[in-house]
Image (cartoon, rainbow, N blue to C red):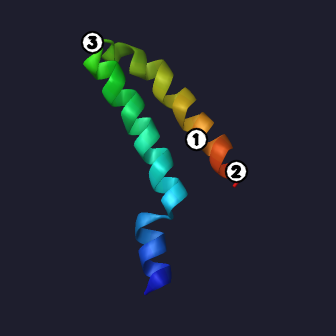
Amino acid sequence: MKAFAKTLFGDAWNIIGVAAIVAVAEGLTALHHAEWAVFALPAAGLGVIAWLARR
């Protein structure tokens, strides 16, 4: 069951990474710069992937 839950939800580091990407999107939307998300979200995603690769 633990393996199923980890596959379904990921581990804590993955959840933190996704939350960071969502925070970037939310912050840009709150600042009325949602069009910048086209450039910021892929960069944030690559940053999170690099961060997770070190773990």
Q: Residues within 10 Å of mark 1 (few under 14, many from 20)?
A: some
Please provide percent x and percent y for residue 6.
Answer: 48, 72
Q: Amino acid at mark 2?
A: Ala
Task: State the CA–CA distance, disc 3 to disc 1.
Answer: 24 Å
- Looking at the picture, how far across and down is residue 17, in whole percent? 50, 46
Going by the numbered disc 1, the residue's amino acid type is Val
Residue 6 marker: none
Query: Where is 21 relative to 12, above or below?
Result: above
Q: Which mark sits nearer the N-terminus, 3 or 1?
A: 3
User: Image check: 11 left or right of 34?
Assistant: right
Q: Which mark, by number, is residue 53?
A: 2
Q: Earlier in the sequence, mark 1 or mark 2?
A: 1
The residue singled out by tag 1 in the image is 48
The residue that appears at 38% across and 34% down in the rendered structure is: 23
Image position of 48 (left or right of 40): right
Label 2 environment density (alpha carbons within 10 Å; few <14, some 14–19, many ≥20): few
Q: Residue furthest bottom?
A: 1
**Which residue type does callout 3 highlight?**
His
Mark identifier at residue 32: 3
- C-beta proximity under 8 Å, tags 3 and 1: no
> Which quadrant is home to the N terminus?
bottom left
Sequence-first tag of 2 and 3: 3
Q: Residue at x 70, y 50 (%)?
A: 53
